[in-house]
Structures are given as C-alpha cells and as structure tokens.
Amino acid sequence: MRRLQRRLAGRDERGSAVVELVWLGLLLLIPTIYIVLTAFEVQRGAFAVSAAARAAGRAYALSETDAQGRAQAEAVARRAFEDQGIGDVPRSVRVSCSPDGACLSGGSTITVTIDSRVDLPLLPDALGGDRPSIALDATHSVAYGQFQEVR
C-alpha cells in the first residue's frame, strides 16, 4: 500500500487538467449540441404544421366549391411548410366537415388536420431503412362564414 502511495505521490500531473477539461467538454458538448439542433428542427416543424392547418382551414372556408377548397387547402399548406424552410417533407391534409359532410353551407364547421414528420438531423441514410423521425400533427376548425372575402 505504501509503495502505491509513494508511486502516486511522485507522479507529475502537470497539464493533465487541460486534457481532462477538453475531453469532458467534448463528451458533454456534442450531445448537448445535438439535442439543441433536434429541438430546433422539431419546433420548426411544429410551427409549420400549426400554420398549415390554420391557413388551410381559412382557405377552404373562403372557397366557392369543395374541389376548389381542397386544392386551395393543399396549396396553402405546402406554402406554410415552405415558409418554414421544410418544403420537402411528407404531409397529408385531411378535411372533414360537420354536420354530415356539408362543408360550404351555413352552420357547418370545417376541420383541417395536417399530419407530417420531421427527420432527426445529422443521421445518415447509411444506418439502414428510413431515417428516424418525429411525427407532428395539427388540427384547426373553422366555422363556415367566419371569414369573408371582401372584393
């Protein structure tokens, strides 16, 4: 035991604190940066999905026919995603109306649901299969007649 204490006492440790600080810094900093980047990507996707649902509902409510409403809802949803810089993600736009599917009639409520996903950053496709992603969705309801187009 005394030999070990003498051996450790005689050891020169000058400069090892810098090495330990650098390694600990890297070991803690890299995962922290990755978590922050992931949070930013998810937040950007959440903003896009929310804005897309809101805009699609308004566009549908302002349309003259159901077919025109669905086309406008798709177009404004795509634009909302492009505004956030994520125009190439898969998304689905679903429109439902109550009562009884009558969308453009007095007293109806138009509900738009947007489903999408955000891929996790910095993960290559070489890991196999689809890239890991986080699912996002948003729903927005608009009462028909709430928004009016002024000409």
Image (tube, rainbow, N blue to C red):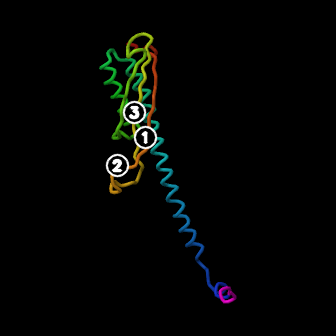
Rendered view: 123 above or below 143: below
- Circle nearer the N terminus (2, 1): 2
Examine the image and state in which quarter residue 105 appears. Answer: top left
| Image x and y of residue 32, in percent | 52, 55
Amino acid beneath label 1:
Ala
Question: Which callout, 3 or 1, points to the residue nearer the camera?
Answer: 1
Neighbourhood count class around disc 2 (C-alpha, 10 Å): few under 14, some 14–19, many 20 upward = few
Is residue 59 a member of the stretch shown in magenta?
no
Q: Is residue 14 left or right of residue 57?
A: right
Q: Quadrant of the C terminus?
A: top left
- Circle nearer the N terminus (3, 2): 3
Q: Is residue 2 left or right of residue 26?
A: right
Q: Which residues are magenta?
A: 1-5
At 49% from the left and 59% from the top, the residue drawn is: 30
Q: Which residue is mark 3?
A: 80
Neighbourhood count class around disc 3 (C-alpha, 10 Å): few under 14, some 14–19, many 20 upward = many
Q: Which residue is mark 2?
A: 130
CA–CA distance between discs 3 and 1?
Answer: 17 Å
Using the image, tell me which numbered label, if any, was put on residue 135. 1
Neighbourhood count class around disc 1 (C-alpha, 10 Å): few under 14, some 14–19, many 20 upward = few
Question: Which callout, 3 or 2, points to the residue nearer the camera?
Answer: 2
Rendered view: 42 above or below 12: above
Amino acid beneath label 3:
Ala
Q: Secondary structure at mark 2?
A: loop
Amino acid beneath label 2:
Asp
CA–CA distance between discs 3 and 2?
Answer: 25 Å
| Image x and y of residue 31, in percent | 50, 57
